[in-house]
């Protein structure tokens, strides 16, 4: 049987169980907030949003955190915890190769946690504050995260990371850090280690090939975003440092030259395979010069892409990744609404901040 | 190995059901030997057919059952719907039973 995504397992024992996992994922996708709920939320104050969340999916987290936090903080921590609970559950019921692929993608949160710890240590934040910002959705277990939190210096963090997938990369970047005294080399090393393992030695199969294309698109979009941001900021930074390998759009050296010439960069994207999908946002970018809108459009395109892929290959990693992206999006949306309301933004301004499909 | 067996069984079923000519051309030596000695009576062939149909139904139910249980774990109201969808492939076996009454 060579059903897509069901080849011989690698890593975790047993054969994969895409039927079971995708059925559960689809059910969870069904309870994500929809347009109507968003338009209700946009009209609420942070306290009302928290109360609304208490009556939804997020009940457990709001109740657990309600005594310690309040207002927007409560919402934010509840969102992060809920995200972690759902993604941990995904890893709990996936088996075999499917587990492997999901874990690879969820290591994104390990990378996030490591970067948060680095920043916390660097700015001398107390470990409790750092702990609330952790998203325990990746593969790092609580013991490892606690050891990371206990680390007092950047060097300690690097030592704790020894033996994890970030170990070698962080070790190599530590010298740069000592020279430059900025976190940029370490953060880039973490990101690169994550994307390397994401694309490295993917199994074969029709669904996996499409999935690989999707991952390449994700990396390309990230590079485009970084390139445009660097071009806008006009800072004297080597764009190659921020380049993530594995995309199809351009190489590190090409990125360096394209950053200096935004028009050429836009033309390059237009000619690429993302041209048709991105033509509208690119027009807007050229006309309005607004990077924020363009970045949001990129996310929307990626989200639609993953969703479409999930429909093409319903019994594979694709619908699971689509769900992961949608859930992340929901969390960002609600956070944007809560923060926006707190800052007193108008409803239309907040609605523009949201990415809703 | 198993593939070979299936094709042989298929040949036996076909030849003993008098649909011989086309099948015989493609039949392997082993299958021909089996059919020429008449090792399989028509009712035995029908029984094999039902067994194969049941096998197929079982395989189909494997995936549907897993998905149904997944859906039920998220929402218990789906129990009845899941149960119905899970046993739908059983119709395959019921249709295959027709062969028993025809021989």
Image (cartoon, rainbow, N blue to C red):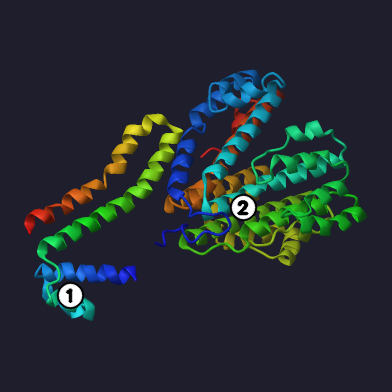
- Residue count near mark 1 (Cα–Cα under 10 Å), binned few <14, some 14–19, many ≥20: some
Q: Quadrant of the N terminus of chain A?
A: bottom left
Q: Residue at x 35, y 33 (%)?
A: B79
Across and down, in percent, residue B89 comes to 26, 48
Mark 2, chain letter?
A
Quadrant in which residue A332 is drawn: top right
Along the viewing direction, whichever of A356 and A16 lies nearer the viewer: A16
Asked whether the viewer can see residue A81, the reply is yes
Across and down, in percent, residue A5 comes to 47, 57
**Direction from residue B96 to residue A32 in the image, left or right:** right
Are the residues flagged by discs 2 and 1 in contact, CB closer than 8 Å? no
Q: Residue at x 67, y 56 (%)?
A: A195
Mark 1, chain letter?
B
Do marks 2 and 1 share a chain?
A: no
Which residue is disc 1 drawn over? B34
Q: Which mark is residue A345?
A: none
Along the viewing direction, whichever of A331 and B37 lies nearer the viewer: B37
Q: Residue furthest right?
A: A179
| Location of residue B15 with respect to A343 vertically, above or below | below
Across and down, in percent, residue A157 comes to 83, 47
Q: Residue at x 78, y 35 (%)?
A: A130
**Direction from residue B33 to residue A186 in the image, left or right:** right
- Residue count near mark 2 (Cα–Cα under 10 Å), binned few <14, some 14–19, many ≥20: some
| Location of residue B85 with respect to B2 vertically, above or below | above
Q: Residue at x 35, y 46 (%)?
A: B64
Which residue is disc 2 drawn over? A104
Quadrant in which residue B37 is drawn: bottom left
Describe the element under mark 2 as helix, strand or loop.
helix
Across and down, in percent, residue A119 comes to 81, 42
Mark-to-mark CA distance, 2 and 1: 53 Å
């Amino acid at each position: 049987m060579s059903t897509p995504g069901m080849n011989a397992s690698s890593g975790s024992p047993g054969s994969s169980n895409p039927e079971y996992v995708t059925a559960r994922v689809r059910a969870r996708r069904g309870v994500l907030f929809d347009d109507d709920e968003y338009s209700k939320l946009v009209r609420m104050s942070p306290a009302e949003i928290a109360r609304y969340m208490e009556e939804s999916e997020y009940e457990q987290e709001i109740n657990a955190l309600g005594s310690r936090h309040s207002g927007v903080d409560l919402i934010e921590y509840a969102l992060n915890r809920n995200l972690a609970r759902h993604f941990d559950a995904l890893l709990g019921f996936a088996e075999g190769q499917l587990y492997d692929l999901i874990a690879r993608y969820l290591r994104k949160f390990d990378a996030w946690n490591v970067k948060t710890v680095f920043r916390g240590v660097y700015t001398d934040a107390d470990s409790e504050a750092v702990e609330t910002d952790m998203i325990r959705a990746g593969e790092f277990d609580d013991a490892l995260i606690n050891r990371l939190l206990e680390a007092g210096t950047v060097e300690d963090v690097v030592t704790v990371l020894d033996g994890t997938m970030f170990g070698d990369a962080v070790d190599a970047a530590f010298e740069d850090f000592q020279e430059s005294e900025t976190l940029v080399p370490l953060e880039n090393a973490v990101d690169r280690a994550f994307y390397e393992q994401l694309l490295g030695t993917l199994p074969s199969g029709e669904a996996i090939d499409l999935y690989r294309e999707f991952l390449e698109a994700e990396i390309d979009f990230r590079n485009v975003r970084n390139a445009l941001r660097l071009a806008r900021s006009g800072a004297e930074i080597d764009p190659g440092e921020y380049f993530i390998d594995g995309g199809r759009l351009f190489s590190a050296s090409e990125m360096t030259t394209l950053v200096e010439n935004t028009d050429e960069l836009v033309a390059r994207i237009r000619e690429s395979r993302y041209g048709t999908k991105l033509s509208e946002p690119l027009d807007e970018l050229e006309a309005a010069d607004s990077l924020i809108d363009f970045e949001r459009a990129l996310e929307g395109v990626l989200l639609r892409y993953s969703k479409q892929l999930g429909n093409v290959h319903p019994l594979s990693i694709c619908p699971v990744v689509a769900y992961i992206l949608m859930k992340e999006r929901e969390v960002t949306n609600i956070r944007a609404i809560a923060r926006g309301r707190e800052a007193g933004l108008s409803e239309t301004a907040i609605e523009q901040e949201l990415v809703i499909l | 190995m198993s593939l070979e067996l299936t094709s042989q069984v298929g040949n036996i079923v076909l030849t003993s059901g008098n649909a011989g000519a086309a099948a015989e051309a493609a039949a392997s030596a082993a299958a021909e030997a089996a059919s020429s000695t008449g090792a399989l009576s028509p009712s035995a062939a029908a029984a094999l057919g039902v067994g194969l149909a049941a096998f197929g139904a079982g395989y189909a139910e494997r995936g549907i059952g897993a998905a149904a249980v997944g859906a039920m774990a998220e929402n218990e109201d789906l129990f009845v719907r899941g149960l119905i969808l899970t046993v739908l492939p059983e119709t395959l076996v019921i249709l295959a039973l027709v062969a028993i009454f025809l021989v």
